[in-house]
Amino acid sequence: MLVVGAASKLDYAFGSEMLLRPPGGQNEGHFIATCIKCDRCRSACPMNCIAVANMNDGVLNARTPKLDFKKGYCNFCNLCIVACPTGALREFDPDVEWIAPAVIDASLCIAYAAEGGGCNKCVEKCPYEAVTSDAYGRPVVESEKCNGCGYCEYACPSNSYRVFSGVRKRAITVEATEKVRTLVAAAEGVS
């Protein structure tokens, strides 16, 4: 029971899911310690992909910026980094750094349902050629090429076609995972 209580308190404080941060905010410890929730990064974003976290994302995350690829995608213009007055968002090079990898949910993907036919939007739209087609015409993410720009998620029409089932998630999503956070922290020499 103690573990359940502790887990629910942590979920209340930090939310149950990891948030995708704007470019340069992938070191969560540094980001949370320096972000003053000023909203300048969201206001500066020409692609409209930065949203504001709410209480469902955890008390400590509320009003901090998070990426929402249903509204837009990141072109790595770095205007959010320039607008950040505290350095919470640091320099970011999309050729060597990443936000998080895209992940395909085959149960929601139109191409998987149609056995390779019907949709290829994520493959067509990926500017980094990280989403390719397999031998059956179904999308596959090459995670070593994916930097998490979100263009695939933004372009994915699966949610529109599957609205009857009540699913709000798209077939391809960029997802922050503990593994990604650990790799970012290790690359920056943070434990």
Image (cartoon, helix red, strand yellow):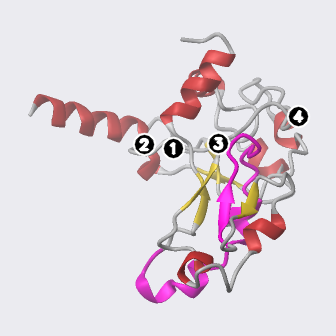
- Amino acid type at circle 3 is Ala
Does any portion of residue 30 appear in the rendered image?
Answer: no
Answer whether labels 2 and 1 touch (C-beta < 8 Å): yes
Question: Quadrant where the N terminus lies?
Answer: top left
Residue type beneath disc 1:
Ala
Instruction: Indicate the secondary structure of the residue bearing disc 3.
Output: loop
Sooner in the amino-acid sequence: mark 4 or mark 3 = 4
Secondary-structure class at tag 4: helix
Residue type beneath disc 2: Gly
How far from the left and from the top, in percent, is residue 108? 51, 74
Q: Position of residue 127 (x, y in %)?
A: 87, 56
Picture disc at residue 62: 1
Q: Mark 2 — residue?
A: 58
Q: Which residues are magenta?
A: 138-167
Q: Is residue 74 left or right of residue 103?
A: right
| Residue 75 x, y percent position in the rendering | 86, 51
